[in-house]
Amino acid sequence: MKIIQLLTRPQLRGAEIFALQLSEQLKERGHEVLVISILSGTGDLAFSGEFIQLGRQNRTHLDWVGFWQLKKIIDSFQPNIVQANASDTLRYGVFAKKLATNRFQLIYRNANMMSPFIKSRWKKMYYHFLVNQTDAVISVSQATRIDLINFYGFKKVTKTVPIGIDTLEIERLSSQKLDFDLPQNFLLFMGGLVPEKNPEWLLTTFFEYQRVWSHLNLVYMGKGSLENRLKSKIMKYGLEDRVHILPSQTNPFPILKRAKALVLTSKIEGLPAVILEAMIHKVPVIAFGVGGIPEVLKTEETGWCIPPKDSQAFIEAILEVISMKKGTKQKILDQAYLFVCTHFSLPQVSLQFEEFYKYLLKQN
């Protein structure tokens, strides 16, 4: 097959990283794969095949110059499959298909809950139009799949295929040495410093309970619109020695493996890869059960899945993790590790994508 994978921009974000991993797997299986990033970005992403970066500016919903550029590439490459991987790739994929002369199947990979981001009737109508111009949707979790079907009334083919984890590569990367010091005994928040990830709630909670867990530190790893606000609050709370903000890392695993627990306080999620990556490192995971998280995180089986907005239960889970008997905790971590290895290996997940592509082409 000839396959195009569309990325929003070169950035160290889950959707882009997984799309490149998937592209490498498909290429190894003998398919001709072209990767195209749409918007300008600064992330250091690599692909062993052809990788075109359009570098468009995100200024308008109707970027006809960008649509036409993508259309010309599609006409030249003549793919069987074009997969739009989340976010802005949907509109570019749809309008490029409208302009393109060759016929192909357009798949949208839905990596997050869509309905919470839609705040106006016009926006819902616009995305309803876009989603229904695709030929199929692959969702990262059952929760995101059901959300899309119910919110947009999508009646075409849908399938749930999770993210895949390259366990051997993760283990190799996690063995690399850090060139900076980390605090002892830290909780790790890993993700965008944006409102939907709810990092401010975590900081306030850490401050309010600082005497209860006086031996713990807190590390944020990521960047986003709330970074300066968080830094100001850290100074206001007098927590400069206990709370640290690290930028997004090309290789986050040497940091992740040292954490006492991964803590995710998101209001909205699809299925964060970092949860599975923490499980591979046998790091306890404490997260609010939003989106697809409850599909992988089972309390006291594979981690600690907290009812959304139940702040007290989240705090109690942190206290339980740091005080739990070693043998009891190790059993949960071992179960989580086995769960990921069994259901989320990158080759296994890539095969599911490949089989779905073939099914879609056979039906059309």
Image: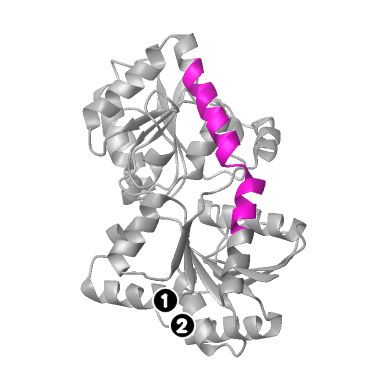
Q: Is residue 187 visible?
A: yes
Q: Residue at x 52, y 37 (%)?
A: 276
Res 43 → quadrant: bottom right
Estimate how packed mark 1 is, as few (under 14), some (14 to 19) or many (20 or more) residues with alpha carbons within 10 Å.
Answer: few
Q: Amino acid at mark 2?
A: Asp
C-beta proximity under 8 Å, tags 1 and 2: yes
Q: Is residue 13 visible?
A: no
* Residue 192 image offset from top left, x and y in percent: 43, 48
Q: Amino acid at mark 1?
A: Arg
The quadrant of the picture occupied by the N terminus is bottom right
Question: Would residue 312 appear left or right of 303 to someone viewing this image?
Answer: left
Q: Is residue 333 magenta?
A: yes
Number of disc labels: 2
Region rendered in magenta: 330-353
Label 1's element? loop
> Which residue does the numbered mark 2 point to in the structure image?
63
Magenta span: helix, strand or loop, mainly?
helix
* Residue 144 image offset from top left, x and y in percent: 38, 55
Image mark for residue 135: none
* Residue 35 image offset from top left, x and y in percent: 65, 67
> Which residue does the numbered mark 1 point to in the structure image?
59
The quadrant of the picture occupied by the C terminus is bottom right
Front position in the image: 86 or 235: 86
Choose mark 1 or mark 2, whichever is in front.
Answer: 2
Front position in the image: 253 or 118: 118
* Residue 171 image offset from top left, x and y in percent: 67, 33
Label 2's element? loop
Q: Is residue 173 above or below residue 33?
A: above
Front position in the image: 33 or 29: 29
Q: Residue at x 40, y 16 (%)?
A: 322
